[in-house]
Amino acid sequence: MRFEEQLLMDLKAEMTARNERSRRVGRRLLAGAAVAGLAAVAAVAVPLLTGPEPAYAVSENANGTITVELKEFRDADKLEQDLKDLGVNADVTYLKPYTQCQNDRGTLVGGGYDTPEEWRESVHYKVARPGPKGFVIDPRHVGKGQTVALEFTENPKGPFRSQLKASVIEGTVKPCVPVHDPTQLG
């Protein structure tokens, strides 16, 4: 065999080996892409099958209070129903930053308050307090025919994600009409 023929045969063998390696790499890449595609489908399908994460969590405490942990400002009607199932009539309103509901939403239980001391002694102060995982409602401060109006305002600049205002109203609670909140900067 001549040198040129041997060189041609070696070249053909090298080309065949390269093609085989290329096919193996291509198959590996294709298999990797398939696995990545399945993972992406699972990432989308699992939340669709299990549903979105709840906007809040409600739990009853041993002392009769109720802890509410807000995760998102949505599902106010469902939160109201969950609280009602636990014996508390509630009106839940989520507000945009720098707003509050108008002051006259109904007859305040125990009347109004003018000083910080009166506020701290009022049922409105005692009905809903900050807790370790959200806020805690004390149902003992909401009597028959009364509703606790819970107003949550997003607080983008403050140290806390939201502000809570709670009022205990006798009878029907008027719908919230959002107005500018002069106590918030913005």
Image (cartoon, grey):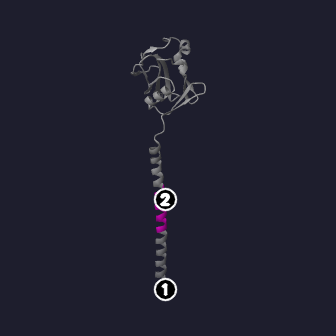
Q: Closer to the camera, 49 or 123?
A: 49
The residue under the point 46% across, 78% down is 12
Q: Position of residue 154 (x, y in %)?
A: 46, 28
Residue position marked by numbered label 2 in the rendering: 32
Q: Above or below — where is 55 with respect to 121?
A: below
Element class at badge 1: helix
Element class at badge 2: helix
Give the image quarter of residue 67.
top right
For the residue marked with disc 2, what is the amino acid? Gly
**Can residue 157 be seen here?**
no
Residue position marked by numbered label 1 in the rendering: 3
**Can residue 37 be seen here?**
yes
Q: Position of residue 102 (x, y in %)?
A: 41, 18
Q: Position of residue 61 (x, y in %)?
A: 58, 28
Q: Closer to the camera, 90 or 97?
A: 90
Disc 2 versus disc 1: distance between alpha carbons? 43 Å
The residue under the point 47% across, 43% down is 50
For the residue marked with disc 1, what is the amino acid? Phe
The residue under the point 48% across, 88% down is 2
Q: Above or below — where is 155 with respect to 22?
A: above
Magenta range: 23-35
Mark 1: few, some, or many residues within 10 Å (few <14, many ≥20)? few
Q: Position of residue 7 (x, y in %)?
A: 48, 82
Q: Above or below — where is 178 with respect to 20?
A: above
As drawn, the residue found furthest toward the right would be 62
Q: Quadrant of the C terminus?
A: top left
